[in-house]
Image: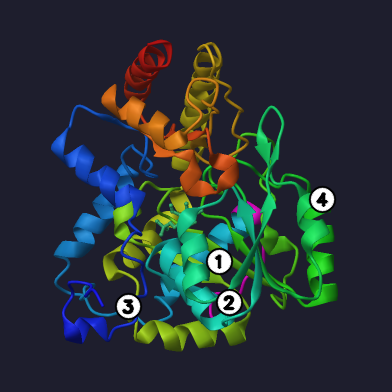
C-alpha cells in the first residue's frame, strides 16, 4: 500500500482536516502579502481605523503599572465588561440580559461559536444552516459530526433571510437552527419581527435550539435591527453570538461574546478554561471603559458603509453581465458574474489577475456558484480603484 508520506507514527493519527482542505482566506492572505498592489475586497475585515478614544484607552491601560491589567481575567470575562455589554444590549436592542448569568466574553465570535457548538452539538445531531452561508460555521458543524441540512436564502432586489424557507424545514428531528442576520456573504437579513417570532414559537414547540449570529448587527440599512434577544428572554431556546470585531473594527483584538441560558454559560465557562482561559484582558478593560460612548462611531461607520454600498451597487449593475443585489445589512455584496464567467473560481482568478482579490462565491455553498463576495467596509478610494479594475476584467 502506498504511504501517505507522513511517516508511520503520523499515519496512526486519524486526520481531522482533509489534506485537500485549505482555507481560501489563508491562500488569499499569502497572495496579498506578496503583491501589495492588489486591492483586497476578499477578507472580511472592517477596513478602517477603530475609534480613536478606544485606542487611547487601550494604550493607557497597557502602560498601567498600578492596576495590573495584563493578568488573566475571570474565565467568564471581567464583571465591568459584562456590565458594559449588558448596557449596550439594553440601549441597542432593549434587551434585559443579566451580566452575571447570561454573558460569557470570548476570543471573538469565532470562539463563541466554537464553544456553543462544542457544548450543544453531538455526532448525528441535525442542524439547519443558511445557504449561501459562512464557511467556518459549516466546517465547525461538520467536524462535530452534525448532519447538516441547508435552507436557502431568498433573492429579490436584495438577498433576504426567508422565514418561510426556515419554517418549512423545522420539525422535531432538528436540534439546532442557525440564523445569521445580517448574513455573511450576502447581507441578507431577517427584518420581519413577526416572522422571527413565529420561528421562535416553532422552535419552542419542537424543542429546537436557535443560534443567532449577530456579529454584523451594527451594519443595517433597512429599518431598526430585530435582534433575537427580545424573543426569548429566558434563553430556553436561544443562544446569541456577538462580537466587537466588525462593529468597532478591532478584528485582531479578539473580543466577542455568547449571550445564553445560565446553565449553558456555565458549561461553556468550564470548557473555555482549557481553550483560551480568558478573552484578551486589555481589550476587555478598554471596552468596559469605552463602550457607553460607542454609538457615535457606529452611526458614522454605518453611514459610510451604506454610502459605499449604494454607489457600488449602481456601478456594478451598470457593468455588462453583472447583476448585483443590494445588501440589507453587513458589509459584503454578493454580485452574480455568471453571465461573464460561469465558474466563480475562474472569475475570482480573472479578477485577481486584474488586481482585485475577492472571495469566490462557491466557497459559501452551491447557490454561490457564479458569484463573488466583495467587501465594502473600506475607504471609497480603494473601492473605486477596485471597481475600475473589475470593469476592465468584465469587459475584457
Ligand atoms: N460570524 C460570522 C457570520 C462571521 O462572518 C464572522 C467573521 O468573519 C464571525 C462570526 C466571527 O467573527 P470574529 O471571530 O472576528 O468576532
Q: What element carries label 4?
A: helix
- Whether residue 21 is situated above or below residue 155 in the rendered picture: below
Choose mark 4 or mark 3, whichever is in front.
4
> Mark 1 — residue?
86
Gap in angstroms between the C-alphas marked 1 and 4: 32 Å
Q: Where is residue 386 in the image (x, y as percent from the top left)?
A: 35, 22
Q: Mark 4 points at which residue?
A: 164
Q: Pointer 3: what residue?
A: 276
Identify the magenta region.
92-102
Image point (59%, 65%), residue name: 240
State if disc 3 and disc 4 touch (CB < 8 Å).
Answer: no
Q: SS class of the residue under badge 2? A: loop
Ligand 1 neighbours mark 3 (CB distance < 8 Å)? no
Q: Is residue 155 left or right of residue 255?
A: right
Disc 4 versus disc 3: distance between alpha carbons? 39 Å
Q: Is residue 247 magenta?
A: no
The relative height of residue 81 versus residue 336 in the rendered view (above or below) is below
* SS category of the residue bearing label 3: loop
Q: Distance between the residues labelled 3 and 2?
A: 19 Å
Any part of residue 355 in sight = no
Query: Is tag 4's residue or tag 3's residue first in the polypeptide sequence?
Result: 4
Q: In which quarter of the image is the N terminus?
A: bottom left
Find ligand 1 in the image and state its quadrant: bottom left
Q: Which of marks 1 and 2 is nearer the N terminus?
A: 1
Question: Which residue corresponds to mark 2?
Answer: 102
Image location (x, y in percent) of residue 335? 53, 29
Instruction: Label the magenta part by its dominant secondary structure.
Output: loop
Q: Earlier in the sequence, mark 3 or mark 2?
A: 2
Q: Do the residues labelled 1 and 2 touch (CB within 8 Å)?
A: yes
Task: Please tell me whether residue 280 is drawn above or below residue 293 in the rendered image.
Answer: below
Amino acid at each position: 500500500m502506498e504511504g501517505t508520506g507522513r511517516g508511520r507514527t503520523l499515519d496512526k493519527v486519524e486526520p481531522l482536516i482533509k489534506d485537500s482542505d485549505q482555507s481560501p482566506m489563508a491562500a488569499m492572505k499569502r497572495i496579498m502579502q506578496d503583491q501589495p498592489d492588489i486591492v483586497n475586497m476578499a477578507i472580511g475585515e472592517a477596513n478602517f481605523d477603530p475609534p480613536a478614544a478606544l485606542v487611547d484607552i487601550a494604550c493607557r491601560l497597557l502602560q498601567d503599572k498600578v492596576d495590573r491589567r495584563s493578568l488573566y481575567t475571570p474565565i467568564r470575562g471581567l464583571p465591568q465588561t459584562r456590565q458594559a455589554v449588558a448596557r449596550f444590549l439594553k440601549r441597542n436592542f432593549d434587551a434585559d440580559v443579566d451580566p452575571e448569568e447570561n454573558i460569557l466574553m470570548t476570543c471573538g465570535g469565532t470562539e463563541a461559536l466554537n464553544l456553543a457548538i462544542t457544548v450543544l452539538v453531538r455526532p448525528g445531531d441535525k442542524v439547519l444552516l443558511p445557504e449561501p452561508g459562512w464557511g467556518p460555521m459549516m466546517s465547525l458543524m461538520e467536524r462535530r459530526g452534525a448532519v447538516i441540512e441547508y435552507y436557502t436564502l431568498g433573492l429579490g432586489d436584495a438577498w433576504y433571510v426567508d422565514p418561510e424557507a426556515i419554517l418549512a424545514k423545522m420539525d422535531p428531528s432538528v436540534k439546532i437552527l442557525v440564523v445569521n442576520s445580517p448574513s455573511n456573504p450576502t447581507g441578507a437579513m431577517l427584518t420581519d419581527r413577526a416572522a422571527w417570532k413565529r420561528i421562535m414559537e416553532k422552535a419552542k414547540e419542537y424543542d429546537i435550539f436557535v443560534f443567532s449570529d449577530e456579529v454584523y448587527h451594527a451594519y443595517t440599512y433597512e429599518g431598526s435591527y430585530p435582534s433575537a434577544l427580545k424573543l426569548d428572554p429566558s434563553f430556553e431556546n436561544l443562544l446569541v453570538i456577538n462580537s466587537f470585531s466588525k462593529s468597532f473594527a478591532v478584528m485582531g483584538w479578539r473580543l466577542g461574546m455568547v449571550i445564553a441560558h445560565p446553565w449553558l454559560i456555565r458549561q461553556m465557562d468550564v470548557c473555555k478554561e482549557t481553550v483560551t482561559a480568558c478573552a484578551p484582558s486589555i481589550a476587555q478593560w478598554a471596552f468596559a471603559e469605552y463602550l457607553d460612548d460607542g454609538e457615535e462611531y457606529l452611526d458614522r461607520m454605518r453611514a459610510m458603509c451604506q454610502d459605499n454600498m449604494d454607489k457600488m451597487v449602481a456601478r456594478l449593475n451598470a457593468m455588462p453581465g453583472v447583476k448585483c443585489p443590494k445588501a440589507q445589512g453587513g458589509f459584503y455584496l454578493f454580485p452574480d458574474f455568471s453571465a461573464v464567467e460561469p465558474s466563480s473560481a475562474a472569475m475570482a482568478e480573472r479578477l485577481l489577475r486584474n488586481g482585485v482579490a475577492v472571495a469566490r462565491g462557491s466557497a459559501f455553498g452551491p447557490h454561490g456558484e457564479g458569484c463573488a463576495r466583495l467587501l465594502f467596509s473600506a475607504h471609497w478610494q480603494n473601492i473605486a480603484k477596485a471597481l475600475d479594475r473589475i470593469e476592465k476584467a468584465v469587459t475584457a
